[in-house]
Amino acid sequence: MPHSHLVIGFAPLLDCAPLVAAASKGYAAEQGLELALVRETSWASIRDRVVVGHFDAAHMLGPMAIASTLGIGHLKIPMIAPMALGLGGNAITVSAELYEDMQRSGMGEHAQPRAQGDALRRVIVSRRVQGKPALTLAMVYPFSAHNYELRYWLAACDIDPDQDVQLVVIPPPLLVDAMRAGHIDGFCVGEPWNSVAVEAGVGRILMGTTAIWRNSPEKVLGMRTSWAQEHPEQLAALIRALHKAAAWCEQPENHVELAALLAEPRHVGTSADVLQRTLSGRLRLTPQAEPVRAADFYIPSRNAANFPWQSHATWFYSQMVRWQQVTASEQNAIAARDTYRPDLYRAALAPLDSDVPSIDAKREDFSDAPVEVPSPRGGLGIGSQGFFDRHGFDPDRLV
């Protein structure tokens, strides 16, 4: 049987791992697929090439698919996300100079997000008194978990993201050079670019964003709704291939090989040692420090990491409303929610007899203990969850 040829766009980040493994380890071929992976520098380029049909599907920011469906920030092209590509993997990094300023403002070693935010607020106030320009912080795309996680942390620490700092968009691979040149004071991005900044001596990692939101959502498999409707068999095969690839990526014994694959210039193109370290959740926060373990920093497969929770889509929509990117309406809320397609995910995995959540959405209540959700086998563990400020999110109570 001839293989279906699919062109898939991706950004050079740690969490493109399931795509790389699917193409390189035979999981795609096993499903009758031939994947052509195309590396792109910017998320805007990935968006545009999906929109015009250059890519059949892509490693995509979850909120990007929602924004395209709602027609905000660009053309209105309905998209779907029938699978998530993992949980976590992001961090917030600041320049060496800003890090020292925060230390002088009372930030202790290994401080928690609240204490870090308080120190940053004191730096901002001090700079304002001295007549210095506002700090410039970068994220990778206006419709991204990075933007919303960064804004959530700042706002929870009484820093107005639109008044007290300047937020700019810079593609992931260019952030380290922008910091080195002194153009930005900090950024939120996926690995390995935080660690690359530390290795280069220009950045200091404050925290993984899973310290802001435990088991937080990240990239998805995204595509035009029309493509998915026209190619249901190829889509189901792609989901199965990525599901198996993500499970392979999860296993610690595969991390040396996976890091070597990701380190190739055609993929991420950075140090295999750094990639291997971050795959195991060990981050070197400052150049001279020993790596520290960040709990559940990046999860490719376990904790239902590939399930496209509609509550994640709804949270992203709630942040779009909060930060005035879109007008709140019942129609918009439904369209945003339905961009994530757990029904397609379940149908694709049915032949594999995999245990998946039997609900489409969940509350995001703070819990130190592992959470379990209903599944066909009686219950599926999804790890601990919740936001650092202990505020919950109920997808059924949008305001």
Image (cartoon, rainbow, N blue to C red):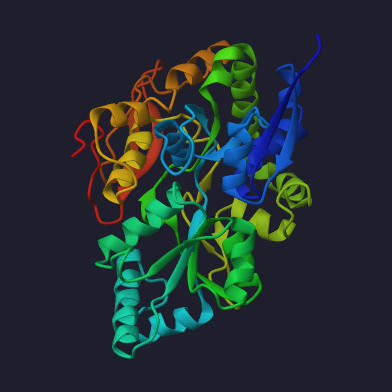
Residue 226 drawn at (x, y percent):
54, 19
Residue 195 drawn at (x, y percent):
60, 64
In the picture, the quarter occupied by the N terminus is top right
Query: Which image quadrant is residue 271 in?
Result: bottom right
Residue 165 drawn at (x, y percent):
37, 70
In the picture, the quarter occupied by the C terminus is top left
Q: Which residue is drawn at 36% across and 43% down?
A: 384
Residue 250 visible in rendering: no
Q: Is 210 positioned to the left or the right of 276 in the image?
A: left
Residue 263 drawn at (x, y percent):
75, 52
Outermost residue to the top: 1
Query: Which image quadrant is residue 193 in?
Result: bottom right
Q: Is 115 positioned to the left or the right of 274 in the image?
A: left
Quick check: 379 above or below 364? above
Q: Is 73 positioned to the left or the right of 18 in the image?
A: left
Quick check: 287 above or below 143? below
Quick check: 140 above or below 227? below
Query: Which image quadrant is residue 209 in?
Result: bottom left
Q: Which residue is drawn at 30% across and 56% down?
A: 388
Q: Is 280 positioned to the left or the right of 398 in the image?
A: right
Q: Residue at x 34, y 88 (%)?
A: 131
Camera-side residue of 283 and 35: 35
Residue 180 visible in rendering: yes
Camera-side residue of 340 and 321: 321
Camera-side residue of 55 and 186: 55
Outermost residue to the front: 75
